């Protein structure tokens, strides 16, 4: 069933990358849990580019905003946890890519876009969200959860 | 590199689940545990620092005790009959805050909301509390303004152009007839400044309660004549400094009361504007003619002058009708300082400035600095204004231990050389690179204000404030306080004492500027004297 033959260093680095991205996402979620007044409102309202209308209308509707906030906080936390522990790896990585894609298209680093809260670096067209998204995509095609991760246990159970 | 096949489940391909499987499965789980531990410790540390900070400052972190906007009182609930004197821009705005809006505004806001989903002004306006008021009389010397006021007075259902209407107010040719009417209990005065004193005095003598626009007066004599009339006739008087209702100002008072800033020696306050409108170059109405403006009534006790549409619409540019920066804009700033610090009337003023940019024939300066001394408080107040640059500067209170920036929000920064906070700064409990206290009104609630003009005012708290997380119009709150004063005898926040403080302080600045001399306040004689 396994078609991946990693060397030791390949495996270590792929797992390290997975855990690091998982850590990043999970901590972003956890700090928001600790801060009940957090809302994605400002971020969505500050949206620029092709989809800004969509994101701003999400923010303008309090009911939708509540759902977006909830999905953000718990999505980040659970996806992050799943990536760290290698649980439901495929699903977690798809979730991570969807979330990162949303972050990217909500604040694309366009030439003329000027954000209220500028990022901590200098970007044109490519930013850290896109890099992280691509890194998750790489992990998606080079999975490790079934080797180092809870998915390994699940797979073994299934096999039985 | 070794080609060691670590791969996968096949490696331990025995029956059941081996020990290695379990180890490899759970190898990264401790990382999640480490994250949670780290996050928790970090949170704990922040909490500790925060509580230490509050302890050091003896500051309650709870919200400001501001009256709820939905408060209902028992007692007299009969409709208050109000007359509006002056239905130009400001008069119409105050009518709007009373609950009587021109239908065209509802139309405009409704249209704007269709294009911009963030625009919820119609909704907010319709939710504004009904003050149980009827507009029973209006008067204005310009027929176009009068008609606009009349139309607004009928809009009891707060609808757009095609909506249902109520009874119109009675139109009076002069304010004297209006204040003599029996079916008027109270008046709102929103006329040019040179009319304020006479109108307030006459209304008080007629037993009408008064809400008057700032500034109170043009001279010291007028100021004390107003004070006498209001006190002798026992009417409820409120001056239109709606800043009194701003949440961050109430919070600033708390900060001062708890002596967080230490000894305050300097307060700086500012006006920056950079547009024709901001410099009082208002539009001249295209329909304005000597035929539909009662020019003689407009002039009143002001020096005679041939009809001038420019003077009629841009009256703030001339000493005959206004005191320019000191009366129109410094009074707002001063009243906040007086609200927060109870400074009262200063001992002296020294002003300088000139007409440097708006060379349009105006008399009042467009750049002005006034330095006020408060001997008893051992403090200076500096007012710095320009109408030719729009950089926004925040009111700042400088104390030995900290300084406070005050606006619609509030920030307090510790001074790195503070005596009181020395240990706390060294221990890292008090930051010096970021504010140690912040207060953002309506935090947690969501709102967005669309036009730049509104943003300008909102930033200065002149448009909206928050009560219970809800956005409300400060003029509405200020008028409501006045109405509660009339109905229930509750105190008003900008009554006659505060108004006299405001007026005399502004006049000290004006007299100093016009005479190019430092001037002093003689508290016994109640007059301005030259040193």
Image (cartoon, coloured by chain):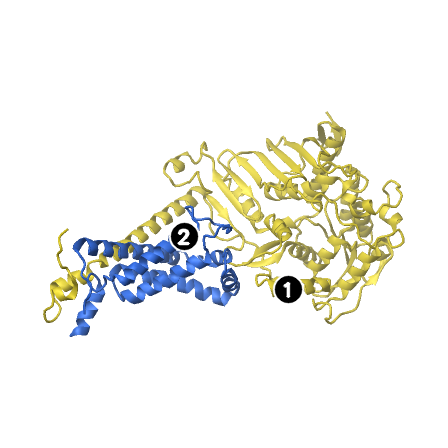
Residue B296 picture location, percent across and down:
89, 48
Q: Relative to the observer, which residue lies in front, B228 or A113?
A: A113
- Output the letter for the chain in yellow: B
Residue B400 picture location, percent across and down:
50, 33
Q: Quadrant of residue A7?
A: bottom left
Q: Is residue B230 above or below residue B347?
A: below
B497 relative to B257 in the view: left or right: right
**Nearer the viewer's eye, disc 1 or disc 2?**
2
B198 relative to A50 in the view: left or right: right
Q: Secondary structure at mark 1?
A: helix
Q: Secondary structure at mark 2?
A: loop
Q: Is residue B125 visible?
A: no
Q: Is residue B225 above or below residue B94?
A: above
Q: Relative to the observer, which residue lies in front, B503 or B7?
A: B7
In the image, what residue occupies the spot 80% across and 64% down?
Answer: B169
Q: Is residue B1 visible?
A: yes
Q: Relative to the observer, which residue lies in front, B56 or B506?
A: B506
> Which residue does the numbered mark 1 point to in the structure image?
B122
- Output the letter for the chain in blue: A
> Which residue does the numbered mark 2 point to in the structure image?
A126
Residue B170 badge: none
Q: Is residue B459 above or below residue B470?
A: above
Label 1 – label 2 distance at C-alpha: 41 Å
Chain under numbered label 1: B
B412 relative to B154 in the view: left or right: left
């Amino acid at each position: 069933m396994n078609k991946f033959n990693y060397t030791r260093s390949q495996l270590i680095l792929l797992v390290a990358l997975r855990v690091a991205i998982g850590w990043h996402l999970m901590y972003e979620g956890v700090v928001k849990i600790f801060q009940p007044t957090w809302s994605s409102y400002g971020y969505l309202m500050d949206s620029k580019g092709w989809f800004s209308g969509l994101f701003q209308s999400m923010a303008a509707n309090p009911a939708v905003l509540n759902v977006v906030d909830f999905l953000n906080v718990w999505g980040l936390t659970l996806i992050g946890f799943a990536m760290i522990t290698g649980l439901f790896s495929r699903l977690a990585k798809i979730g991570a890519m969807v979330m990162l894609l949303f972050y990217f298209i909500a604040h694309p680093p366009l030439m003329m876009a000027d954000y209220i809260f500028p990022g901590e670096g200098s970007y044109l067209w490519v930013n850290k969200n896109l890099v992280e998204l691509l890194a998750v995509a790489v992990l998606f095609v080079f999975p490790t959860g079934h080797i180092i991760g809870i998915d390994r246990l699940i797979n073994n159970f299934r096999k039985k | 590199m070794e080609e060691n096949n670590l791969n996968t489940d096949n490696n331990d391909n025995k029956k059941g689940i081996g020990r290695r499987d379990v180890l490899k499965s759970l190898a990264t789980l401790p990382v999640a545990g480490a994250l949670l531990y780290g996050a928790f410790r970090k949170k704990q540390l922040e909490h500790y620092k925060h509580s230490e900070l509050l302890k050091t400052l003896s500051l309650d972190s709870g919200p400001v005790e501001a009256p709820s906007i939905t408060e209902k009182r028992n007692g007299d609930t009969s409709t208050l009959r109000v007359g509006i004197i002056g239905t130009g821009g400001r008069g119409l705005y105050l009518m709007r805050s009373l609950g009587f809006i021109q239908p065209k505004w509802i139309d405009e806001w409704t249209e704007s909301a269709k294009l911009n989903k963030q625009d919820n002004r119609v909704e907010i306006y319709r939710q504004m509390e009904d003050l149980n008021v009827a507009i029973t009389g209006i008067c204005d010397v310009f027929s176009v303004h009068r008609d606009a006021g009349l139309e607004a007075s009928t809009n009891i259902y707060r609808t757009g152009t095609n909506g249902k209407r109520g009874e119109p107010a009675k139109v009076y040719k002069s304010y004297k007839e209006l204040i003599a009417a029996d079916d008027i209990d109270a008046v709102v005065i929103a006329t040019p400044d040179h009319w304020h004193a006479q109108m307030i005095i006459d209304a008080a003598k007629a037993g009408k309660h008064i809400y008057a626009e700032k500034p109170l007066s043009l001279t010291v004599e007028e100021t004390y004549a107003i004070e006498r009339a209001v006190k002798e006739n026992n009417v409820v008087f409120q001056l239109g400094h709606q800043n009194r209702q701003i949440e961050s100002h109430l919070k600033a008072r708390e900060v001062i009361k708890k002596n967080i800033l230490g000894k305050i020696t300097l307060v700086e306050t500012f006006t920056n504007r950079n547009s024709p409108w901001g410099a009082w170059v208002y539009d001249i109405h295209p329909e304005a003619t000597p035929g539909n403006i009662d020019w003689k009534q407009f002039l009143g006790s002001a020096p005679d002058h041939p009809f001038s549409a420019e003077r009629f619409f841009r009256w703030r540019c001339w000493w005959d009708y206004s005191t320019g920066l000191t009366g129109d804009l410094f009074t707002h700033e001063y009243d906040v300082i007086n609200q927060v610090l109870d400074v009262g009337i200063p001992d002296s003023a020294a002003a300088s400035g000139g007409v440097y940019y708006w060379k349009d024939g105006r008399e009042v300066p467009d750049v002005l600095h006034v330095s006020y001394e408060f001997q008893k408080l051992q403090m200076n107040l500096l007012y710095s204004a320009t109408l030719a640059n729009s950089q926004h500067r925040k009111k700042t209170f400088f104390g030995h231990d900290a300084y406070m920036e005050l606006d619609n929000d509030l920030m307090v920064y510790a001074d790195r050389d503070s005596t009181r906070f020395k240990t706390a700064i060294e221990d890292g409990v008090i930051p010096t690179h970021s504010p140690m206290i912040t207060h953002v009104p309506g935090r947690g609630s969501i709102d967005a204000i669309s036009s730049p003009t509104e943003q300008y005012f909102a930033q200065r708290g002149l448009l909206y404030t928050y009560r219970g997380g809800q956005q409300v119009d400060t003029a509405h709150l200020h008028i409501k306080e006045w109405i509660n004063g009339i109905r229930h005898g509750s105190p008003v926040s900008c009554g006659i004492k505060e108004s006299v403080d405001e007026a005399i302080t502004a006049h000290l600045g004006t007299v100093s500027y016009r005479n190019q001399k430092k001037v002093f306040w003689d508290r016994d004689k109640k007059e301005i004297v030259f040193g």
